Image: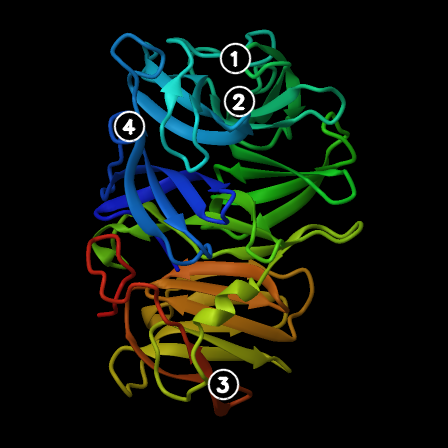
Amino acid sequence: MRYAPPGLCVNDFALLRDEDGTYAVLHLQGPWTAEFDHLRMETSFGRATSTDLVDWQPQGTAFGVGLPGRFDQQAVWTMHPVRHGEGMAMFYTGVSGLTPAGWPLQSVGLAYSDRTDGTGWRRHGTGPVVEADPRWYRTGERMGWRDPFVVRDDETDGWVMAVCASDASLPVEVSGCVAWATSDDLEHWTVQPPLISPGDVNELECPVLERLDDGSWLLLGSIGSTRGFEAWTAPRLRGPWTRRGPLGPTGSYAPRVIAAPDGSRAVLHTTPRRVGLSDTGERCRGMLAQPKSLVVEGDSAPRLEWWSGLDAWLDEETDGPALHAVGDIGITGPVEITLRTDAPGGNRSALVVGCDGKNLWITGPDGIPLGETILAEPATALRILTIGEYVEVYADGVFALTALCYSGQPVPWRAVTEGRERTIPVRPIRLPDPRRDDVSAVWPGP
């Protein structure tokens, strides 16, 4: 349902689907700590497998840093594997060291495998296959050249790579862009001017390119300053690209698109946690969240909706308390829904979801704000999901808000509208491995 390997946290990741329908996730992994040193702690890729995108089983480490003196000797960051012949080619970020001011020197490398399950990688040579071109991108201090994503070109028989970069023509604080490069053979690349350079983004990380059913393109990019991700669309890879706004709320990051078992498009993303499993703990790298359904219809902006594959993990409705649950409520006016109180049967709220039309929010103990957003249109219905400390809210079916809360005891959900209180039935969620109790397990409650 949510996943991290034993004792570790998950950061950026890639998804594969084998011929037999088995999914594999390759992910950055590092220890559970607030002061996270991504140069010394993200030195390998973990791997896990699933048949349904929900129940993930750890399979150990699949790839690590290069030998001393090579471009990837310090760290290996975000990767993207693509089918190549009977096996796969994987592009990944390599960090060789630091600039004099301490900035990581990044480039993109290539590894091959004869397999399609995310294992058996061997490097292509000892150097990178593509580096930042100083004509368009920063190459020293405050550089960016990471998070490669490779797709077939829609105008040639070759390939296109999208890369997180820093536009040299803009002030560094707004220089986040998506660079691109082209290749005929996956090994020799020609760097091109920026594909997207918004001019108001500090970092535009983890770009994703997805070709839609009508031949047009969707690009997802994670925004460093907001810790959410946005969407762009274009009729062809070379543009023109139209910015379509946020697709995921703050807290959801590094999305990937994959064909679900039923053939529909699903999006998975990461979500943070807090050190010490406490509301006062520092935010840290976290877990893989459950899938969302990607909906792209005509000229409408792309959106994420509830993914029906989760329904198989829901039990029958109950009016009783449940720490892991899904509940639905129609809205006819301002409402506040209490999910937890400070004690069993207590009256002091510890976790509340509220909405007064366009304003949607989540509060913790003593009404402390945990998350809020302004909806494009007043909501008529909410769906709320809680798994351990993790809370998601869907407004009229669209993924709108997420937050973390480690406080309180589950109680029957109570909705208050205009002074009237009613109980909201919920469907408890069955966790794939409820007895798991390592540091990366789903929070079991206080």
Q: Residue at x 43, y 39 (%)?
A: 13
Q: CA distance from mark 3 to mark 1?
A: 56 Å
Mark 1 vs mark 2: which is more N-terminal? 1
61 in relation to 130, above or below: below
Q: Using the rendered view, name the quadrant where residue 181 is placed.
A: top right
Q: Amino acid at mark 4?
A: Thr
Q: Which residue is mark 2?
A: 165
Residue 43, disc: 4
Left/right of residue 1 with respect to residue 205 in the rendered view: left
Q: Gap in Å between the C-alphas at discs 2 and 4?
A: 21 Å
- First along the sequence among labels 4 and 3: 4
Residue type indicated by callout 3: Val
- Disc number placed over residue 84 in the picture, else none: none
Q: Look at the picture and state if 146 lies above or below 276.
A: above
Residue type of the residue flagged with mark 2: Ala
Q: Are marks 1 and 2 in contact (CB under 8 Å)?
A: yes
Circle 2 packing at 10 Å, graded few (<14), some (14-19), many (20+), is many
Mark 4 vs mark 3: in front: 4
Q: Which residue is identified by label 1?
A: 132
Q: In whole angstroms, how far apart are the C-alphas of marks 2 and 3?
A: 48 Å
Q: Residue at x 79, y 43 (%)?
A: 214
